[in-house]
Amino acid sequence: MSSVSRLVSSVCKKIIKPYSPTPISLRCHKLSYLDQMVGGIYLPLALFYPKLSNTWSNKPNNVVSQHLEKSLSKVLTNYYPFAGKLNDNISIDCNDSGVEFFITKINCPMSEIFNHPYFEKHNLVYPTEVINNQYTYEGSLAVFQLTHFSCGGIAISMCLSHKVGDGYTFGNFMNHWATIARNPLSSEIYPISPKFDGSFYFPPTKDEDSSNVSNNNIVPQREECVSKGFSISSSKLTALKARVINESKVQNPSDTEVVSAFLYQRAMATKKLVNSSSIRPSLLHQAVNLRPPLPKHTMGNIGCLFSILTKEEKEMDLAQVVSKLRKEKEEVKQKYKNAKIEELLPITLEQYRKANDLLVNNSCYDLYRFSSLITFPSYDVDFGWGKPEKVISPLSTSNPPIKNMFVLMDAKNRDGVNLTCSMKKQDMLAFERDEELLRFASPTS
């Protein structure tokens, strides 16, 4: 047993089922083509709450757990596929078999987890079997853990199967759950009523071909990597934006564009130092949410990606990278703008083919993946005892982490951007010491 795992003193497991049975008409949830493409990885996210507010501080641990369990049961009525069973790569049998809910105690204060230089101790707040087998886990399609710390604080973690939905689905589920928990006796209606109708927009492949549907861009190879967190304050972000505005035609660069371009630039520059060579041909993949043009209530995997290629050192300029990102994004938006329903899947698959062709035809050595949850209100998730002190972003705890993966999230109080980077250890050692990076980004652990 490792010194880290010894901190866990007890583990209790429960099965939480939907509050109301799923109607017969919804029992078979067909996977969309995009659902079929993604790997079976579980997306993890954890919310950390310091010592609970006065109303909750003196209540026993089991009352906190029951509060979460009851509200989870109610929200599963709306998000019923998570409580079902995957049927190969074809459908989900929405049989209300339930989700796993773990309760643990950790013999250390919450601060000890935060101050760990990498993410090893953060994994303690996730269900062990899921975090150690994120690509092969065969339990429920959503797994939760409530962790009690010795200081009185708690963490709530969630691991949701990517087969059921993307980050947008994840976010709506989490906020819907918190709304019900915060107002258990209220008839308040959550703003977005979920519909799992992705197969209407992206029809699945024929049943016999479903096992062959895959894409290397969505199912990345696993390698031994390390993850580390950084933050860019709002003032530093403003300075980066000013540089872009002064040196390009992009006069309204977004947080995602600027931070993605900056990290990509610094990752390529430090990689060049590690290899003592000229720049290596590199590709940036940026995930894009397709709501709109698709309805906001549509859950599942509803997105595509666009890519930019960098082959020469002169293309590494920050303003130039942002300009290329903007150009590609606008072209993608234009393709979908007036598309008919039957055109959505061909357009999306063409985006993935284009990315693959860029990767293969240019002998790219390095692929950098970016996923942005900026503007997603993760720091507003209040189950009744206040907002979280810290949120650990999805994929930052992947085991092993995905090589060259960057996840961007709003910082607490919208004061800048938090980011998680996963790289090979030697690349991370160079990246985290890069002077230009540290002028704008501060390590968070």
Image (spheres, grey):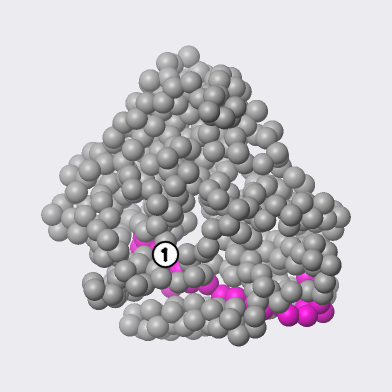
Q: Is residue 8 left or right of residue 76?
A: right
In the structure shown, which secondary structural element does the residue marked by tag 1 occupy? loop
Q: State the image coordinates of residue 381 (x, y, percent, origin top left).
A: 49, 41
Q: Which segment did they paint magenta?
A: 291-318
- Please report the residue visible at 60 percent of the width from the left and 39 percent of the height from the top: 120
- Please report the residue visible at 40 percent of the width from the left and 52 percent of the height from the top: 136
User: With respect to residue 147, does 308 lie above or below?
Assistant: below
Asked if one can make out residue 170 in the rendered structure from this viewpoint, the answer is no
- Please report the residue visible at 39 percent of the width from the left and 32 percent of the height from the top: 102
In magenta segment, residue 124: no
Q: Which residue is under mark 1?
A: 38
In magenta segment, residue 292: yes
Q: Which amino acid does label 1 sit on?
A: Val
Q: State the image coordinates of residue 434 (x, y, percent, origin top left).
A: 83, 55
Tell me where residue 11 sits by quadrant.
Answer: top left
Quadrant location, the C terminus? top right
Q: Is residue 308 left or right of residue 39?
A: right
Q: Is residue 335 left or right of residue 326?
A: left
User: With respect to residue 125, does 39 lie above or below?
Assistant: below
